Amino acid sequence: MTVDNKQLTIFGARFEGLCALSIALCQLSILILLIPSCSPNKHVHAEQYTCPMHPTVVQDKPGTCPVCGMDLVLKGKHGEEAKITDELHYLLKPVNSTVISSIKTVVPVRKSMNIRANANGIIVYDTRALTTISSRFNGRIEKLFVKYNFQPIHKGQKLLEIYSPELLTAQRDLLYLLKSDKELIDGTKEKLRLLGVSVEQINQLVSRKEEINSFNVYSSAEGYISNTSENLTSQTELEVREGMYVSAGQTIFKVVNPKNVWAEFDMHSDDAVLVKVNDPLQIKFDESTEVLDARINFVQPFYKNGQSFAKVRVYLSNSNGKYHVGQLITTSFNSTSQDSWWIPLSSRLSLGTKTIVFVKKDGIFQPREITTGYQSDNWLEVLKGIDATDSIAYNAQFMIDSESFIKIYNHEK
């Protein structure tokens, strides 16, 4: 096939045109790709939402967490920082500077304080009027004429009958000796009297000339029957029963007399040193506006094991039955202290074995251990640890970081 020069020229021209067009298209494509990457302020990122409690849950649109059901929040973009506004700037201030700037301070006051102390108490039986009924011989209770605890009785009332082989033998000896020596008779009568037999019962035995199988026990006092336990009001049922055996010297009943009672108070050791016998005080009765002026009759001279309270007692006459055993009462008394340093009670912080205050020095509050004395209402006496020029935080509770501060302070000490 023969190709002339004209055709070759046309073909070459067309080929060069196609090559130029291809190069132009390639340059245009590269320019289009470079335009987004060259823009410094525009980043194309798809928004993502995540769960605050489960960060592994991520999706590209709002919704709820399939695990806990919480609303999804917009996930922050990498490199973004929160803008510090005025409100946020205030919250970012140091905590101690904020607290210290709002603390009120006081200075110690030296004066003689009128100390007013309070104590709680209760009305109890006067144990001086307590009568004990016991058995003088061995025997068995045949009949019991007292049916319940705190049953009222009167002097000379029959309480129970006791069968006693020992007493029965003594009676038979007397009956046998009635026919013999008078000295032996008198000795046997005396034995019966020592066993608790009255003269009337002995005369009855002599006139009847027949022994008595059961012996009557009579009350020697007036009042209310009570059990033999230490706490007279702890039980409502009697401890003795018919058919029980009793031994010589065993206490069967206690008889309490409500005509005289005690007002007994538990006085804290710090306050107990302020009171003494014959000091005046005021007694207030529970759920009553009545106030009774009285005087202290007894201050317990010791503390019971494991207790830090002393008993303070006032004797009260209750012939009209106005006071009831177990009735709750309160008392208050006044005393005057010597000149000493006093601070508000709120300035004290108790750490158990230590007592501290916060003293301001060079704009900084520092804890300082103190030794305290008496307390009067909202004032506390300081015996050691502060000076007249000290500026003390009015409210010590605002100065601590609770447990962490206590641990650090105790460790340093």
Image (cartoon, rainbow, N blue to C red):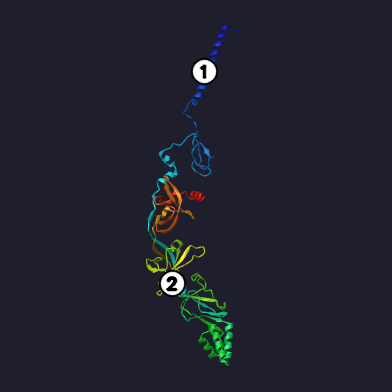
Could you tell me if the residues under marks 2 and 1 are in contact, i.e. CB atoms within 8 Å? no
Q: Specify the amino acid type for callout 1.
A: Ala
Mark 2 and mark 1: Cα distance apart in space: 121 Å
Relative placement, left or right, of 196 versus 342 is: right
Residue nearer the viewer, 83 or 53: 83
Residue wearing tag 1: 24
Q: Specify the amino acid type for callout 2.
A: Val
Q: Secondary structure at mark 2?
A: strand
Mark 1: give few (<14), some (14-19) or many (20+) Cα within 10 Å.
few
Closer to the chain start, of discs 2 and 1, is: 1
Q: Residue at x 58, y 85 (%)?
A: 168
| Residue 41 point in image, percent of width and height | 46, 28
Q: Which mark is residue 261?
A: 2
Mark 2: give few (<14), some (14-19) or many (20+) Cα within 10 Å.
many
- Name above or below for residue 408 compared with residue 59: below
Q: Residue at x 58, y 88 (%)?
A: 173
Q: Secondary structure at mark 1?
A: helix
